[in-house]
Image (tube, rainbow, N blue to C red):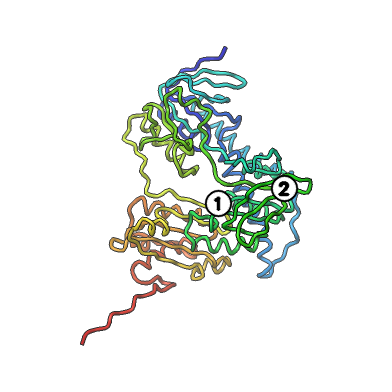
Amino acid sequence: MSDVLETQVLVIGGGPGGYPAALHAADHGLKVVLVDEDPKLGGVCLNRGCIPSKALLHVAKVIREAHEVAEIGVSYGEPKLDLDKLRNFVQQKVVGKLTGGIAQLCKGRSVETVNGHAEFVDANTVKVTGANPKTVRFQHCIIASGSLPAMPKTFAIGDDRVMDSTGALLLPDVPKTLLVVGGGYIGLEIGTVYAALGTKVTVVEFLDSILSMADRDLVKPLETKLRGQFENIYVSTKVTGVEATREGIVAKLEGKDVPPQMTFDRVLVSVGRRPNSQNLALEKAGVKANERGYIPIDKQRRTNVPHIYAIGDVGEEPGLAHKATAEARVAVEAILGEPAEWNPRAIPAVIFTDPEIAWAGITEKEAQEKNVPHDVLKFPWGASGRAVALQITNGLTKMLVDPESKRVLGVGIVGTGAGEMIAESVLAIEMGAVARDVLESIHPHPTLSETIMESAELAYGAATHVAKPRKAAKAGGG
């Protein structure tokens, strides 16, 4: 017979939305139970996504930089790969350390953690199945069950050489050839890792460009570099089928100027993620999900059942870890009766390739589509002393401002460290800053952050290191 737990707040899911929600609630004196299927807390992001991929991308960057520095007179030998040691670094020294830290945080805050699968019995009860079955009765519930890699039927052929992102990040081996299906950020990040380790990578994207969600001028420097690192990048191309053979996975392709089929040692399917809501028995609690599996929520993150909340990937897009963490605070404050509301002006997005791409606020593409008045201010990194010293002059920083008020509407960056630099712009947009606020904030020299300051200067004529193109003067009357 299962144990019965009584709690004020039940959190389902221990990822970047779930465990912060549990800790916030506990910090405010609430009794909290956190249920997660994975024996290690941290969710997909920490165990099988954001963190292991960034650890591997760091390794890839070191390999590339050791090769590139030969151009300025410093040469190293070819890298020697110890795959077991690399796996251990990722899984034990990085992932293991962080998951252990979260477990200690929960223990220190008296959050009771339960390992198992949660399903609703009714609107105030869940049953947890697993090695130690439990029944949990709750006053409030926060669903933070995350998302899963999408695997279309075309690729579900029962062969482990066809991988999703989870399988690819475990580094089963370093294949000679890899097909990446999908030119989004997951596919390009993982493809970058394998290319640095010596794999010949081919990317196939159905749309007419990779990273279709980002502005083209930000994508261009990355695409130029990736075309030098990857074997092929095919856009406007569809994989119509895959077949397992002794020689490899045969992929049938359909598109302009592409071979009808190609054979690869492994295939990575990275065509998006789907919300993890199907096996929660939501209907027993009266919670509604839409046809895509997302749970509709209001500005307090409440579902249609007022004492049940949903945050993170299962609630609404975009599926970003930092969005889930921010939503956790809103949901807990709503439970506490505080006047909390989800209404961010800027949710930053970062693609951790080399160069990185980051943006916050409205993109130029969105501004054009929505007819939002805007001026575009671009600062090329070729005019940055720091970028020249680091030999990363292919970068670009651009700022979108309102033509009249000069309020900062959005910022986009492509280049080394873009993900670290974007936080300043998030703050500027959230605070309603105008370009003069940014340019009059003294930035340290020589740094890449100065490119944000000088982009802002362009709103008022010209930046110190680059002139803004001036409109032709009107002819005077006589």
Left or right of residue 299: residue 26: right
Q: Work out which quarter of the rendered image holds the N terminus and state it.
A: top right
Q: Residue sitting at 53 percent across and 26 percent down?
A: 35
The location of residue 11, given as percent across then percent down, is 48, 28
Left or right of residue 153: residue 329: left
Residue 249: image tag? 2
The location of residue 249, given as percent across then percent down, is 72, 47
Quarter where residue 378 is shown: bottom left
- Amino acid found under the numbered disc labelled 2: Ile
Nearer the observer: mark 2 or 1; the answer is 2
Q: Nearer the viewer, residue 73 or 19?
A: 19
Q: Secondary structure at mark 1?
A: loop
Quarter where residue 456 is shown: bottom left
Q: Secondary structure at mark 2?
A: strand
Looking at this rendering, what residue extends furthest in the right direction? Answer: 246
State the separation of the CA atoms marked 2 and 1.
Answer: 22 Å
**Residue for badge 1:** 184
- Amino acid found under the numbered disc labelled 1: Gly
Looking at this rendering, what residue extends furthest in the top direction? Answer: 1
Of the residues under marks 2 and 1, which one precedes in the sequence? 1
Q: Nearer the viewer, residue 469 or 293?
A: 293
The location of residue 164, given as percent across then percent down, is 63, 43
Q: Work out which quarter of the rendered image holds the C terminus and state it.
A: bottom left
